[in-house]
């Protein structure tokens, strides 16, 4: 049993044993942060293949080369056996919180993890919910599930993850929001996270931490929508939107720059804005900004396709123009295609008669991009001057840092650059 003083002594000596449930985009970097702070970490995942890969030091996420480092630390052990978590003093829960088919939170991974932890954890162990959840979830859904399984003794805290995939930012340097359901849970998670994160930020309730996470991503969603709308206005005015943004960004207060692009993708931005809009509906508050942003995001890929055909027509277009998409991932330097704009842009282009090929040096060998009939489109492995010059249009959808953009800028017959990757390249 952890008394406050035994807990403090244990963290000082790094004797606490930490668990991580869900070894994905959030759980693995968190396990890495824990081991680097000196703790022994047990990582549990339902996916046995993932566990086996990690045990062999093989990466399961291409943009995180963490597996080998975790293994070499000698402090990380992946497991598929939930019973092993019994030995943990603290367990971070990093399970998915997706939307179901009707656009509401699919609570099954949360409920399954709560039921499993209720069964295996030692008395008064601390659970830190790191998954992104609507306000009230930690207190109502998670704590009540633990209680319903006979475990009201377990301490519960929430600390939302602020991972920035592919940005190369150190996880532990990002201020870490945290709150407990009880003073003791708050105290313990704060004590522990003070040894791991540079800036733990204790807030007054789990609901504040939960709502802050959703608002951060909703803020991003609305501002990306605004940047895309503004980009359309600039196009009509024949203004270079990025030159205007450069000018606006010289203002040292009251302005934060967001880039226009082909649309939003990934797991978090579309999902979290929707979770907040759902909460708004439940409590009878309007969420018109969020809903309008979602509409702008939904329309953006079609706008990009129309721009492609407009450019091709202006150049005396062929019936079957050859289009090369560069960058299929949803954003720079990340090997993730979930909700990527390319997934809807490529089929629309092929439906309109274009011959579409694609290049993405970050995506793994299994990645595919399909046309409107579900057929895999050809992948171009090498992006050299001959390749680039063979297309009527090069469409840039992700500005990966490993692409030789000067080759594209110099040798493409025509380009549509939705990311500003080609600025000042010639
Ligand atoms: N990936 C990000 O950049 C990011 C950033 C901030 C917050 N989040 C949030 O963090 C949470 C996790 O996201 P992620 O990207 O790590 O998901 P992920 O899909 O990459 O990984 C989740 C892992 O959990 C495992 N899992 C599912 N149910 C389980 C269960 N009951 N027990 C044990 N393991 C289980 C899956 O097998 C998978 O390995 C979500 O709420 C997400 O919204 C993600």
Image (cartoon, rainbow, N blue to C red):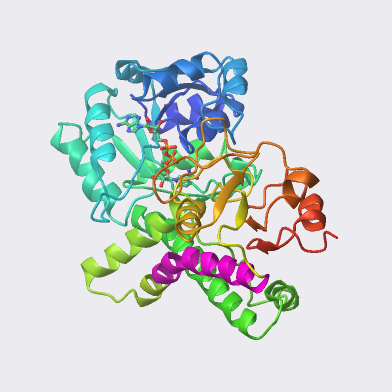
Where's ligand 1: which quadrant? Answer: top left
Task: Determine the residue located farthest toward the front in the rendered image.
Answer: 319
**Quadrant containing the N terminus in the rendered view:** top left
**Quadrant containing the C terminus in the rendered view:** bottom right
Residue 36: quadrant of the picture: top right
**Does the stretch in magenta take in 200?**
no
x and y percent of residue 2 in the render?
37, 27
Identify the main secondary structure in magenta.
helix
Residue 200 shows in the view: yes
Q: Is residue 324 left or right of residue 27?
A: right
x and y percent of residue 37 in the render?
59, 29
x and y percent of residue 269 in the render?
45, 57
Is 98 located above or below residue 68 in the figure? Answer: below
Residue in the image at 35% along x and 20% along y:
85
x and y percent of residue 188 in the render?
43, 38
Towards the viewer: 147 or 23? 23
Residue 204 shows in the view: no
Q: Is residue 205 left or right of residue 32?
A: left
Task: Determine the residue located farthest toward the bottom in the rendered image.
Answer: 237
Residue 253: quadrant of the picture: bottom right
- Bounds of the magenta span? 293-315
Towards the viewer: 11 or 405? 405
Is 195 located above or below residue 207 in the figure? Answer: above
């Amino acid at each position: 049993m952890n008394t406050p003083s035994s807990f403090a002594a244990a963290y000082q000596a790094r004797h606490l044993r930490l668990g991580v449930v869900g070894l994905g985009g959030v759980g693995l970097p968190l396990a890495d942060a824990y081991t680097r702070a000196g703790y022994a970490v047990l990582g549990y995942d339902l996916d046995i293949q993932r566990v086996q890969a990690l045990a062999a030091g093989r990466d399961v996420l291409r943009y995180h080369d963490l597996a080998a480092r975790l293994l070499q630390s000698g402090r990380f052990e992946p497991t598929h056996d939930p019973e092993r978590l019994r030995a943990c003093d603290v367990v971070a829960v990093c399970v998915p919180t997706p939307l179901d088919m009707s656009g509401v939170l699919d609570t099954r991974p949360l409920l399954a993890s709560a039921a499993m932890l209720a069964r295996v954890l030692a008395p008064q162990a601390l659970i830190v919910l790191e998954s992104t959840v609507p306000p009230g979830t930690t207190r109502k859904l998670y704590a009540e599930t633990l209680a319903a399984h006979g475990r009201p003794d377990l301490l519960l805290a929430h600390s939302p993850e602020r991972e920035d995939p592919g940005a190369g930012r150190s996880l532990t340097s990002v201020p870490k929001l945290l709150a407990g359901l009880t003073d003791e849970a708050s105290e313990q998670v704060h004590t522990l996270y003070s040894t791991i994160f540079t800036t733990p930020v204790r807030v007054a309730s789990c609901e504040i931490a939960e709502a802050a996470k959703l608002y951060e991503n909703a803020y991003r969603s609305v501002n990306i929508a605004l940047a895309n709308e503004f980009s359309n206005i600039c196009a009509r005015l024949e203004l270079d939107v990025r030159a205007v943004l450069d000018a606006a960004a010289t203002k040292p207060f009251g302005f934060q720059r967001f880039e226009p692009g082909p649309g939003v993708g990934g797991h978090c931005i579309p999902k979290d804005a929707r979770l907040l809009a759902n909460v708004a509906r439940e409590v009878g508050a309007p969420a018109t900004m969020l809903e309008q942003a979602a509409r702008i995001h939904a329309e953006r890929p079609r706008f990009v396709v129309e721009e492609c055909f407009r450019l091709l027509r202006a150049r005396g277009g062929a019936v079957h123009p050859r289009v090369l998409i560069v960058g299929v991932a949803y954003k720079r330097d990340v090997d993730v295609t979930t909700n990527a704009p390319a997934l809807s842009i490529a089929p629309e282009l092929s439906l309109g008669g274009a011959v579409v090929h694609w290049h993405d040096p970050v995506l793994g060998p299994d990645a595919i991009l399909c046309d409107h009939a579900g057929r895999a489109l050809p992948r171009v492995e090498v992006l050299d001057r001959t390749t680039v010059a063979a297309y009527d249009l090069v469409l840039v959808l992700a500005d990966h840092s490993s692409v030789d953009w000067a080759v594209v800028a110099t040798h493409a017959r025509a380009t549509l650059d939705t990311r500003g990757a080609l600025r000042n390249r010639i």
